[in-house]
Image (tube, rainbow, N blue to C red):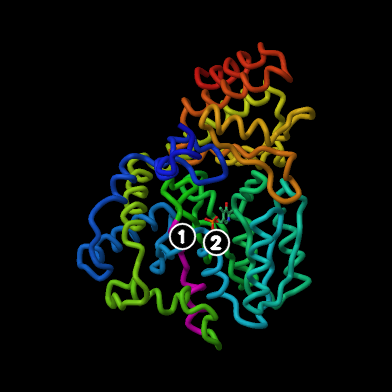
Amino acid sequence: MTTEHNPSALAIPPRRILLGPGPSMVHPRVYEAIGRPLVGHLDPLFLELMTQMQQRLRQVFCTENQLTVAISGTGSAGMEAALVNLVEPGDEVLVCVNGVFGNRMSDIVGRVGGMLHRIDRPWGEVFDPQEIQEALDRSPATRVVAIVHAETSTGAWQPLVDIGRICRERDCLLLVDAVTSLAGVELRIDDWWIDACYSGTQKCLSCPPGLAPLTFGPRAVDKLQHRQTKVASWYLDLTLIQQYWSERQRLYHHTAPISMNYALHEALALVLEEGLESRYERHRLHSRALMAGLAELGFAPAAQQGHRLPVLNAVWVPEGIDEAQVRRRLLDEYNIEIGGGLGELAGKVWRVGLMGESARRDNVHSLLMALGELLTSTTDSAEGTAALDAARAVYVS
Ligand SMILES: *Cc1c(COP(=O)(O)O)cnc(C)c1O
């Protein structure tokens, strides 16, 4: 029966293989956690869970930052929280834009009244620390540098440590978007001199969307404490939110999304049980296998060489393929979701996410097999087999 004639089927979605730019697949233990009975947001049991969650978040962020919390809302709420708290009207902010999410940060800086300095890189490329240095030379009063670690719209992987050093030397804060990188590729808040960072739950943490892990280091907290103006957003005001997350105070601010916090708490346990290094290695392995298979099918990587994310594999769609139709058939006939291009890359690239639970050999296999079948009209069917062989070669090597 189709959903058209059976409205209740909409409420019982199929089990998709989620290989898009997020959400990623969810482990049964996380689904189980989200269905646990509610307690109040000030219940001692819940407060204990928050404390544990903060410890787990610090481990995953590789930080000792006291102010490490889960903001209510998706990754964009984390982005807005970071900017609205660190930027006051008139503050000079340098935003590095090489895709959709740098653009979004620029937009928010304007909304909070910051004075925007923006540098751009072609989509798919990353920034050289030298460019940041020069931009800061041009605008020495810059107080915050904002940059995306893993640009999900292009698959570009931005190195950060040298930029962190430059920001420290210039006494400006480094704010990093780690929505797609946290728990998928290496990220070291303290060692890389990152002052503020946010993420989201539905990418490499493999949790449903709904929370935004956020961490502020001592220099960011100092800025927060010495603001001349109130934070423009009441809901995202960290001076208030930290009173709820602080073990000494536990002051009600807004009702925490209890069930989402259960889910994230469990998802973080899974990350730590696996171990960060093994988890990064797992993402690299499956990405190598996937890209080897896709190459056989005629798909070339779209992001800058040497800076390609294993968790978000962007590839050029070859001429002659109706990319939207193939993606639709992948979904309808194979239950597989992959992402199309965003913005200037719309219609030109595919974005294959291998994030968290989605980064599994059977998923790589299923996608290559499905594409082999779907593309036989435009490519030689032997290429489907060659794609699987190429992936297998990576696994056995
Ligand atoms: C997904 C994403 C966001 C936005 O997160 P939402 O959960 O969609 O609000 C921000 N930055 C990057 C790099 C992302 O990949």
How many numbered dots are placed on residues in this image? 2
Q: Nearer the viewer, residue 42 or 158?
A: 42
Q: Quadrant of ligand 1?
A: bottom right
Q: Which residue is mark 2?
A: 76
Q: Mark 1 touching mark 2, by CB under 8 A?
A: yes
The answer to whether residue 226 is visible is yes
Amino acid under disc 1: Ala
Ligand 1 within 8 A of label 2's CB?
yes
> Where residue 343 appears, x then y in whole percent?
72, 51
Ligand 1 within 8 A of label 1's CB?
yes
Determine the secondary structure under disc 1. strand
- In the picture as drawn, the residue positioned furthest to the top comes out as 382
Q: Which residue is mark 1?
A: 212
Q: Is residue 34 left or right of residue 43?
A: right
> Where residue 58 appears, x then y in whole percent?
39, 58
Q: Nearer the viewer, residue 354 or 129?
A: 354
Residue 177, located in which quarter of the rendered image?
bottom right
For the magenta stretch, what is the residue range?
210-226
Residue 86, located in which quarter of the rendered image?
bottom right
Q: Residue at x 47, y 79 (%)?
A: 234
Amino acid under disc 2: Ser
The answer to whether residue 281 is visible is no
Seen in the picture, residue 37 relative to 219 is either above or below; the reply is above
* Residue 220 included in the magenta stretch of the image: yes
In primary-sequence order, the first of circles 1 and 2 is: 2
